[in-house]
């Protein structure tokens, strides 16, 4: 490999390395946005459950379906929050 090839390769590596912090920030914001969407989904499902309980026509299957959906979204939200901590929070050693 000649000097020019080495310099170009080094330059490409440096350029890629410079972009890493920005990509990490974008990824973190993306996950935070996903978490907000899941929190909103939880609130919506809770409202649907309450509305279904007070509906003129009582539909147990609908209520139970909403509860199943809510349990899944809550589990995914919990895992998403754990992922946020795992991937993006830095630990400071003293």
Image: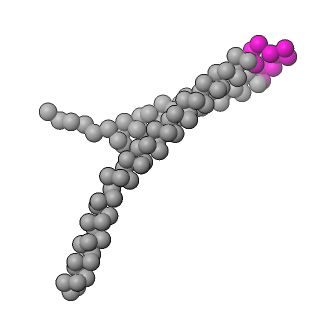
At horizontal 67% and vertical 21% (from top left) the residue drawn is 47
At horizontal 80% and vertical 15% (from top left) the residue drawn is 55
Q: Quadrant of residue 73?
A: top right
Q: Is residue 71 visible?
A: no
Q: Quadrant of residue 16?
A: bottom left
| Quadrant of the drawing holding the N terminus | bottom left
Picture layout, residue 80 above or below residue 24: above
Q: Is residue 47 left or right of residue 93?
A: right
At horizontal 22% and vertical 78% (from top left) the residue drawn is 7
Q: Is residue 14 visible?
A: yes
Q: Quadrant of residue 86?
A: top left
At horizontal 58% and vertical 30% (from top left) the residue drawn is 40
Question: Colour scheme in the image?
Answer: one colour
Q: Is the magenta stretch mostly helix, strand or loop?
A: loop
Which residue is farthest right?
57
Residue 63 point in image, percent of width and height:
73, 21
Q: Is residue 70 left or right of residue 10?
A: right
Residue 13 point in image, percent of width and height:
28, 68
Quick check: is 34 in the magenta stretch? Answer: no
| Quadrant of the drawing holding the C terminus | top left
Q: Is residue 81 left or right of residue 52?
A: left
> Depth check: 82 or 19 in front?
19
Which residue is farthest left?
94
Which residue is farthest bottom?
2
> Depth check: 36 or 52 in front?
36
Find the magenta span and give its range. 52-61
> Depth check: 71 or 3 in front?
3
Q: Is residue 65 left or right of residue 42?
A: right
Residue 66 point in image, percent of width and height:
69, 26
Q: Number of callouts in the render? A: 0
Residue 26 point in image, percent of width and height:
42, 49
């Amino acid at each position: 490999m000649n000097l020019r090839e080495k310099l170009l390769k080094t330059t490409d590596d440096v350029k890629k390395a410079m972009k890493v912090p920005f990509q990490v920030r974008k990824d973190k914001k993306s996950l935070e946005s996903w978490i907000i969407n899941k929190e909103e989904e939880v609130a919506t499902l809770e409202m649907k459950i309450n509305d279904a309980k007070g509906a003129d026509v009582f539909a147990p299957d609908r209520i139970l379906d909403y509860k199943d959906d809510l349990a899944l979204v809550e589990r995914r939200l919990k895992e998403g929050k754990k992922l946020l901590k795992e991937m993006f929070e830095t630990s400071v050693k003293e």
